[in-house]
Image: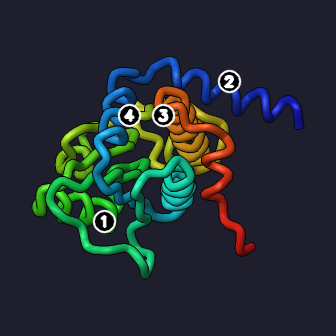
Amino acid sequence: MKKEIGVILEEMNGVFHKMDEEVTDGLLNYLRSGTRIFIVGEGRSGFMAKAFAMRLMHLGLNVYAVGETITPSISKGDLIIAISGSGSTKSVVSVAAKGREVGCKVFAITTNDQSELANVSHEVLVIPAATKNRLEQETKSVQPLSSMFDQCVHVLCDAVCLEFSLTESISHELTYSKHSNVE
């Protein structure tokens, strides 16, 4: 199993070395704006989106996961973070397009900067990891489907949360106070 873990970490490291760090800084600036945040993704990307939403909530941000029954309507000035490896997941593109129409800022996380999602977004963070489509610009992977993309999204979002917590001086104790106590 150590060999496989090493392969996964090596693949992820290769992806992170190819990324544009300035775009990640842009995401941090959006998070600091104090606006409401709506995060959307489907399937495995949706799980990563919900994990990111939970972490942002623990950091004290006003965040919602699109599709949940308690998610309110979007409004002008809100931030939509749309996660789709392919950038062509219809429901994610639809939410991003609706957000742009309403006047939200739309920030996409995808592998494909030429995708439908990228085209309706204000800013695009490209994670050049392998997806199920295995497009030419994607990093090669021995892992099945979009595993590499999902792993990279998860780690990247955790890094964003860590940077946010450090720069905003948000302590472990404060985040722990927001952790569920009805489990």
In the rendered image of this protein, does residue 1 appear above or below residue 65?
above
- Residue sitting at x 71%, y 74%: 182
Q: Residues within 10 Å of mark 4 (few under 14, many from 20)?
A: some
Q: Position of residue 120 (x, y in %)?
A: 18, 50
Left or right of residue 174, residue 90 in this image: left
- Which amino acid, by three-letter code, is at mark 3? Phe
Q: What count of labels does the image hold?
A: 4
| Helix, strand or loop for disc 3 | helix
Report the side of 142 relative to 105 (left or right). Answer: right
Do residues under tags 3 and 2 come within 8 Å of each other at their CB atoms? no
The one nearer the camera, 75 or 172, is: 172
Q: CA distance from mark 1 to mark 4?
A: 26 Å
Image: 73 above or below 79: below
Look at the numbered discs 3 and 4 and tell me whether their residues touch, using CB distance below 8 Å.
Answer: yes
Q: In percent of the image, x 45 and y 64: which residue is there? A: 42
Give the spatial CA distance, label 3 vs label 1.
30 Å
Q: Nearer the viewer, mark 4 or mark 2?
A: 4
Q: Which residue is mark 1?
A: 90
Instruction: Tell me, yes or no, whether the two marked residues, 4 and 2, touch with CB atoms within 8 Å.
Output: no
Q: What residue is drawn where x is 48% and y is 34%?
A: 164
Q: Residue 164: which disc?
A: 3
Q: Is residue 47 left or right of residue 8?
A: left
Q: Secondary structure at mark 2?
A: helix
Q: Which residue is mark 4?
A: 28
